[in-house]
Amino acid sequence: MTNSLLQFLRLATAFSVLAAAPLAAQTRPKKPAVAVPQPVVGTWVGTATVPLADSAIVVPVFYTFAQGPDGITGTAMVPGQGTGPISDVVRDGPIMRFRVTTTKGVLEHDGKFNSDGAIEGIVILNKLPVARFKIALKK
């Protein structure tokens, strides 16, 4: 099995890639933040891009945020791969942070609303960036 295929299988089984190439060379989204408050509660759809040594894997992702008695919670899902609970949702103006718990660990999401209302950012596992994500509120 090639390294790229092995890395893909790790992503598919745990919504994470432990052996992915670091994202240190990548920068934050370049679009300016939206000044108008954006809703968070609802279903967000988009992609996660996992860089590999010689390519990248792009997978569809779905995040459903709901207002609960103790704040915003939810569920993240990669089709055909499983789901994980969303917790520790923090919204500070254009900044949006949350966690997704998987069988392989906690995926920290650090994002920012861009000018078209989407959230773009990075996914961190074990203090290392492993993917970029971009999601938009489903209409």
Image (cartoon, rainbow, N blue to C red):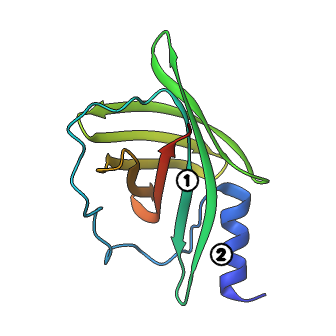
Residue 124: image x %, image y %?
43, 57
Task: Decide which of 85, 113 is in the foreground and name it.
Answer: 113
Task: Decide which of 22, 42 is in the foreground and name it.
Answer: 42
Residue 36: image x %, image y %?
24, 34
The answer to which quarter of the image holds residue 90 is top left
Q: Is 82 placed above or below 12 here?
A: above
| Rendered residue at 66%/64% (across/down) | 11
User: Label 1 vs label 2: CA separation?
Assistant: 21 Å
Q: Quadrant of the C terminus?
A: top right
Residue 124 in sight from this viewpoint: yes
Which residue has dot 2 on it? Answer: 7
Residue 115: image x %, image y %?
29, 50
Is 56 on the left-hand or right-hand side of 133? Answer: right
| Rendered residue at 20%/38% (across/down) | 35
- Label 2, secondary structure: give it: helix
Is 119 on the left-hand or right-hand side of 138? Answer: left
Residue 126 in sight from this viewpoint: no
- Label 1, secondary structure: give it: strand
Residue 9: image x %, image y %?
73, 70
| Rendered residue at 28%/30% (across/down) | 37
Amino acid marked by disc 2? Gln
Which residue has dot 1 on it? Answer: 46
User: Around disc 1, counting alpha carbons within 10 Å, would you say few (fewer than 14), some (14 to 19), or many (20 or more)?
Assistant: some
Amino acid marked by disc 1? Gly
| Rendered residue at 79%/53% (across/down) | 80
